[in-house]
Amino acid sequence: MTAVFKDINKFRSKISDAKGSIGFVPSLGALHEGHISLIKKSLTDNDFTVVSLFLNPTQFNDKNDLKNYPNTFDKDLKILEELKVDYLLAPEPNSIYPDDYTYKVTESKLSNILCGATRPGHFTGVLTIVAKLLNIVNADKAYFGKKDYQQYLLIDNMAKALFMKTEIVPCPIIREPSGLALSSRNLLLTENEKLIAPNLHKVISGDSTIKEMYSQLTDLGFKVDYIEEHWGRRFVAAFLGNVRLIDNVQI
Ligand code: PAF
């Protein structure tokens, strides 16, 4: 049975009694096979696994995006119970932001490119909430998917820069058989958009030039935010209707 904690102090006193290694998987909720793969890795690697479900408002630069984000708490809890996750931390916004978001963790280099260039404040919101959660959970290892590769790098660098105890573990991107990277946002795609979406991965995995990839995606109905190459990987962000999808591949 998964023990559910909304109260941060009660969770902290419980987790401090845990005798053994602790693995942590933070999430915004709307769990899918991508999260499940992170949770399974944590369950295999550690004596205890903590999952957090917190729809973090500070990382949403677009209020509509936050409003539309799928909320599937009961379904998520059922998944965690089936997987035999030990602890679920689901704090209220006021309790995790007692400072009303006056204290922030910012990064001044890597966070300015890719998603950081088009989503102002997004990574400050992510780094601040992840720093809070890492402090609260005090895990040995925390697991992040490489679909959000820039996020993973920023969190890994933050943990090292701030001498945090938790090791940040990158995990493979989980894809549908069509190639579409799993994302909670896929739930927001219409039936027709679902048929088009796998082309995002297909196009960036090809050997066209970046300019040609822009045109191919635009012709398919995507509104491309960026296609760029960094750290031996090719990154894409593009809107399909109102849904912003991201992906990356090794080159
Ligand atoms: O990747 C996510 O789901 C979120 O950005 C995270 C890391 C849980 C922080 O809210």
Image: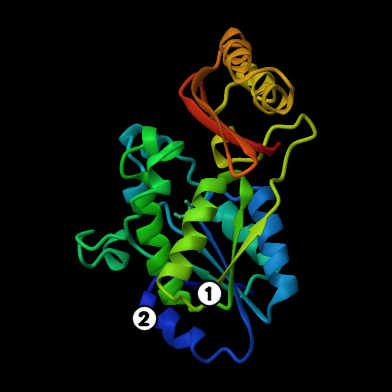
- In-image side of 133 versus 156 (left or right): left
Tell me whether the residue at label 2 lies in contact with that at label 1, contact meaning CB atoms closer than 8 angstroms: no
Question: What residue is at 75 percent from the left and 72 percent from the top?
Answer: 44
Q: Quadrant of residue 106?
A: bottom left
Question: What residue is at 50 percent from the left and 64 percent from the top?
Answer: 52
Question: What residue is at 52 percent from the left and 92 percent from the top?
Answer: 17
Q: Nearer the viewer, mark 2 or mark 1?
A: 1
Badge 1 marks a residue whose secondary structure is loop
x%, y% of residue 134? 45, 71
Camera-nearest residue between 194 and 233: 233
Is the residue marked by circle 1 packed among few (<14), some (14-19), or many (20+) residues within 10 Å? many
Question: What residue is at 51 percent from the left and 47 percent from the top?
Answer: 150
Q: Is ligand 1 closer than 8 angstroms to the Cβ of mark 2?
A: no
Number of numbered discs on residues: 2
Q: Is residue 73 something one can see in this rendering?
A: no
Camera-nearest residue between 94 and 128: 128
Badge 2 marks a residue whose secondary structure is helix
Q: Quadrant of the N terminus?
A: bottom right
Mark 2 — residue?
9
- In-image side of 160 versus 77 (left or right): left
Residue 166 marker: 1
Q: Amino acid at mark 2?
A: Asn
Q: Amino acid at mark 1?
A: Thr
x%, y% of residue 71? 48, 46
Q: Quadrant of the C terminus?
A: top right
Q: In the rendered view, would you say 244 is above or below 153? A: above
Q: Quadrant of residue 9?
A: bottom left
Q: In the rendered view, would you say 107 is above or below 193? A: below
Camera-nearest residue between 155 and 26: 155
